[in-house]
Image: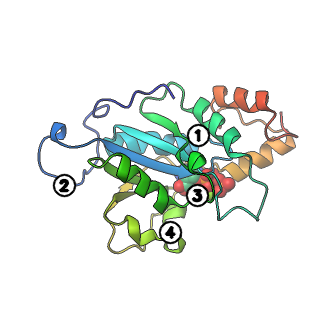
């Protein structure tokens, strides 16, 4: 992405904050961690990331591309991580504060969010980390590896998905709700569309779509 990740956000926003005392300048950076398979990335991901950034006054949102999404591997063929990454990188072009992150790809192996959070915590000791998840993911986080290890390190930012009220069953967590316009789009749906040769224009940013086509991804599609 081209976002520089500096500054404290685009306005006063509607974010409820985290109740930390003191002026903004005295605090470390506020960093959103938005993980996904992004197979492929779509407008729902981007609106979620941009809204989380605005509403929670985040300096940057890292779109962390899963290397091996352990919940999806074995169920279907997942597009190579490097290819998914370059498409996400193209998608965030020109979107301030949104960045594609190779962290899980560079680490290799199965992608556990707890490892990613630990790594970011070590890299940015003073940062406030916000783990951004859609409501569907929030509802199933109980099954994640070492999920409890993240409690003190992150604020959970739950973004609406499909108009479903976010239900989080993580009692000791700090949780923020990020309402967003309901966008009924999923990567599964996009893969189907591409395989059938139906259009995905506007559902995927033009630059990302061009990158997909150039790489010959989601063949059978356009
Ligand atoms: P798939 O259909 O393959 O599961 P997906 O569209 O759900 O793909 P993921 O990569 O699984 O995309 O999701 C990454 C993150 O983005 C998750 O936290 C998910 O809840 C969130 N997300 C995905 N689509 C939307 C959407 N339309 N609105 C809000 N959040 C979304
Ligand atoms: Mg999903």
Sequence-earlier tag: 3 or 1: 1
- Gap in Å between the C-alphas at discs 1 and 2? 31 Å
Tag 1 secondary structure: helix
Task: Choose between 198 and 22: the one closer to the eye.
Answer: 22
Which of labels 3 and 2 is toward the front?
A: 3
- Gap in Å between the C-alphas at discs 3 and 1? 23 Å
Sequence-earlier tag: 1 or 2: 2
Which of labels 1 and 4 is toward the front?
A: 4
Residue under pointer 4? 141
Image: 63 above or below 5: below
Looking at the picture, the colour scheme in use is: rainbow
Task: Choose between 46 and 87: the one closer to the eye.
Answer: 87
Location of residue 52 by image quarter: top left
Asked whether disc 2 touches disc 4, contact meaning CB atoms under 8 Å apart, the reply is: no
Q: Is the distance from the Cβ of mark 1 to the nearest ligand 1 atom less than 8 Å?
A: yes
Which of labels 3 and 4 is toward the front?
A: 3
Residue under pointer 2? 19
Q: Residue at x 79, y 55 (%)?
A: 77
- Gap in Å between the C-alphas at discs 3 and 2? 31 Å
Tag 2 secondary structure: loop
Q: Residue at x 62, y 60 (%)?
A: 110
Task: Choose between 198 and 139: the one closer to the eye.
Answer: 139
Sequence-earlier tag: 2 or 4: 2
Sequence-earlier tag: 3 or 4: 3
Asked whether disc 3 touches disc 2, contact meaning CB atoms under 8 Å apart, the reply is: no
Q: Please provide percent x and percent y for residue 24.
A: 18, 40
Tag 3 secondary structure: loop
Residue under pointer 3? 111
State the count of labels. 4
Residue under pointer 1? 43
Q: Residues within 10 Å of mark 3 (few under 14, many from 20)?
A: many
């Amino acid at each position: 992405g081209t976002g520089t990740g500096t500054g404290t956000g685009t306005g006063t926003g509607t974010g409820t904050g985290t109740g930390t005392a003191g002026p903004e300048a005295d605090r470390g950076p506020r960093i959103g961690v938005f993980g996904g398979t992004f197979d492929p990335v779509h407008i729902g991901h981007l609106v979620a990331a941009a809204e989380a950034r605005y509403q929670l006054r985040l300096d940057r949102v890292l779109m962390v591309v899963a290397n091996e999404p352990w919940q999806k591997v074995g169920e279907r063929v997942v597009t190579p991580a490097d290819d998914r990454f370059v498409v996400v990188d193209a998608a965030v072009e020109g979107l301030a504060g949104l960045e594609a992150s190779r962290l899980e790809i560079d680490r290799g192996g199965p992608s556990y969010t707890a490892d990613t959070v630990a790594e970011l915590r070590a890299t940015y000791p003073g940062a406030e980390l916000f783990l951004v998840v859609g409501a569907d993911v929030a509802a199933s986080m109980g099954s994640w590896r070492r999920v409890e290890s993240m409690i003190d390190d992150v604020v959970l930012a739950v973004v609406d998905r499909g108009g479903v009220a976010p239900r989080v069953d993580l009692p000791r967590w700090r949780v923020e709700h990020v309402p967003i316009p309901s966008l009924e789009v999923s990567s599964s749906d996009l893969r189907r569309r591409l395989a059938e040769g139906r259009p995905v224009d506007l559902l995927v940013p033009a630059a990302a779509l061009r990158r997909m086509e150039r790489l010959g991804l989601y063949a059978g599609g356009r």
